[in-house]
Amino acid sequence: MLNNFFSKIYYYLFNITGRANRTEYFIYSIIYALTTIVIYRLIDNIDLYNRSILNWPYALVLHILITTPTMAATTRRLKDANLSLHWFLLYLIPVVKYFLIIYLCIKKTSVNNKTIATDRERILYKD
């Protein structure tokens, strides 16, 4: 069961189609927060002979690699919560982003979500 869960997370790493439940989104958020803290701690606090372990260009690349899956998970979570994708624009504002993440971790899946077909189902089963 746990192996299936992690394989699902790996499959949807950069995928914006489908939906993400609260548990999946919460795990993406925790991984994002922890890795961001580690990256910035390595940049700011650890100096060896007045040289930082991670230089800013490397940190920027790492941050983009970490942020992209979280942004994809946010898109899928907005679909699951039956919210407009315009809410994603709030994700681009640094302070507001954290409130949006908390809100999406708390908000339950929409009841109408079960009646809405995914894009793949609409293509396969045309009405």
Image: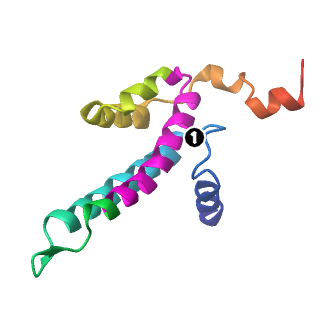
Percent x, y of residue 82: 56, 23
Q: Residue at x 45, y 56 (%)?
A: 65
Q: Residue at x 72, y 22 (%)?
A: 115
Percent x, y of residue 118: 73, 30
Percent x, y of residue 106: 40, 34
Q: Which residues are magenta?
A: 59-85
Q: Quadrant of the C terminus?
A: top right
* Residue at numbered disc 1: 20
User: Of all residues shown, which one is farthest toward the front?
Assistant: 57
Residue 20 lies left or right of residue 96; in this view the side is right
Mark 1, secondary structure of its residue = loop
Q: Predominant secondary structure in magenta?
A: helix
Q: Does the magenta segment cover residue 74?
A: yes
Q: Residue at x 57, y 40 (%)?
A: 20
Q: Quadrant of residue 103?
A: top left
Q: Residue at x 89, y 22 (%)?
A: 126
Q: Does the magenta segment cover residue 2?
A: no
